[in-house]
Image (spheres, grey):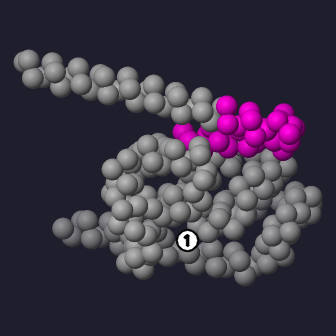
Amino acid sequence: MKTVINSFTKKQWFLWSVLLFLVLFFIFNQELIMLLLDRDVKAIRTFLKNNMIYSFLFMFFVMLIQNSFTVFPLILVITINISLFGFVNGFLWSWITSILSSTIVFYGARYIFQDVIIEKFSDKLIEKVNKNGFAYVFQARIFPFVPTSIVNILAGLSTVQLKNFLLATAIGNFLYFFLLALIPAGILKADLNEYVIWIVVLGGVLIYYLFKMVRNKRKASSIKADTLD
């Protein structure tokens, strides 16, 4: 029991440290935050381009904010990353930081703020997340009808295992982020992006359900073989 309690304490110390850094980040970067709110990509690029290490750190915290409160549009964050780091690096940094940020919010909801925020969500909704687990998170990533922050919080409040949350987030965000990254890169035109996005997203859903069907079939076969033995 002591090991479990100590493990939780370490997570809580880490999460409170991240929260403190987030507050300090707001205090010391008010000018950049205002540029973000104004969606001034050019001004942000000019401000950050001479310090790449700070740029990576700054954009990580922006993604953390986006995953915590959904203050900034996701397309804006990805566009700034591509503007600063190029298409490949910008896309990858957006994807990696989204996974890290989602995990931090997931842990925060589960180990620090659960008692405060769980009353704001219905038992029926949390039970739905419990029941569907991986599928709920994956679908929420590629069909962004629910804000990213809410998905992270609901998963944290539920019994979803971290490995399933990470896998669903990694696959779902990779597909959706890549699609969004094509827009600022100029590969998708504004008048076509909506249709192309939905085609690719639906393709991703079909691939997921095909994978799920094959996995369930193998699982059923394995159970049947064990029964016969």
Residue 32 appears anywhere in the view: no
Left or right, residue 41 beside residue 29: right
**Mark 1 nearby-residue class (10 Å; few <14, some 14–19, many ≥20):** some
Reply above or below: 200 against 166: above
Per the image, the residue denoted by label 1 is: 18
Q: Nearer the viewer, residue 87 or 127?
A: 127
**Does the magenta run of residues contain 59?**
no
Reply above or below: 180 against 41: above
Residue at disc 1, secondary structure: helix
- Percent x, y of residue 153: 48, 64
- Percent x, y of residue 92: 68, 43
Residue 39 sits in quarter: bottom right
Reply above or below: 163 against 107: above
**Does the magenta run of residues contain 181?**
yes
| Residue drawn at point x = 49 percent, y = 31 percent | 208
| Residue drawn at point x = 24 percent, y = 65 percent | 3
| Magenta residues, start to end | 170-199
| Residue drawn at point x = 86 percent, y = 69 percent | 38
- Percent x, y of residue 169: 52, 47
| Residue drawn at point x = 7 percent, y = 18 percent | 229
Q: Main secondary structure of the magenta part?
A: helix
Residue 54 sits in quarter: bottom right
Which amino acid type is marked by label 1?
Val
Residue 109 appears anywhere in the view: yes
Left or right, residue 44 beside residue 112: right
Reply above or below: 37 against 55: below
Left or right, residue 14 beside residue 60: left
- Percent x, y of residue 24: 67, 79
Question: The N terminus is located in which quarter?
Answer: bottom left
Numbered-mark total:
1
